[in-house]
Amino acid sequence: MFDQILNVVKEQMGNNPEASAAIPAEKADDVHKEVANHIEQGIKGQASSSGGIGGLLSSLTGAAGSGNPLTGAIEGGLVSSLGSKFGLPPAVTGAIAGALPGILMKFATKANDPNDKSVNLESITKSLGGGGGIAGGLGNILGKF
């Protein structure tokens, strides 16, 4: 799941001039990995309390709204981490945090799109401890309804 999130982070940050311009070029790869790591940890935490993969994807889709608990949970730790690990100033960490809702929504959109193979629901389910196989596949299908 981490690689799938990392790809979405890189894509979305590249499409967000404010956020991408704020990251020093020599730190971009490490910053992208840090953002992806915080998103992955936030998703794993949210999955257990949101009713499985279907509830999780619904929560991710709603992450663009203000006050979303998942976005807030990820944002707080991420801003602190980016500042302490990379010495990024608040203006830069704020720009990156501002990109989070779009990243989460894009990840959910890709996960819900059966024609988009870049985000694989089975690997997400396995990462979340859901196994996969027939039961995991059935859970994925039912979770979409």
Image: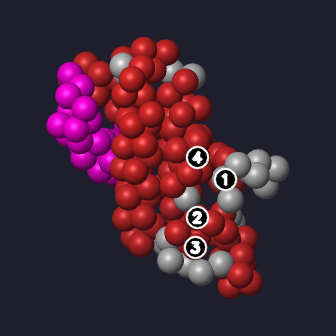
Residue position for label 4: 107
Circle 2: residue type = Ile
Q: Is residue 121 magenta?
A: no
Task: Rate crowding at label 2 as few (under 14), some (14 to 19) or many (20 or more) other CA atoms within 10 Å.
Answer: many
Circle 1: residue type = Val
State which tag comes first along the sequence, 4 or 2.
Answer: 4
Circle 3: residue type = Lys
Secondary element type, mark 4: helix
Q: Nearer the viewer, mark 4 or mark 3?
A: 3
- Where residue 22 appears, as percent x and y from the top left, is 36, 17
Q: Is residue 68 magenta?
A: yes
- Where residue 107 appears, as percent x and y from the top left, is 58, 46
Question: Where, quadrant-wise, is the C terminus in this rendering?
Answer: bottom right
For the stretch drawn in magenta, the main secondary structure is helix
State which tag comes first along the sequence, 1 or 3.
Answer: 1
Q: Contact, CB < 8 Å: mark 2 with mark 1?
A: yes
Of the pair 23 and 78, the residue shown nearer to us: 23
Residue position for label 3: 126
Circle 4: residue type = Phe
Residue position for label 2: 124
> Quick check: can you spot residue 119?
yes
Q: CA distance from mark 1 to mark 3?
A: 13 Å
Secondary element type, mark 3: helix
Q: Which residues are magenta?
A: 65-89
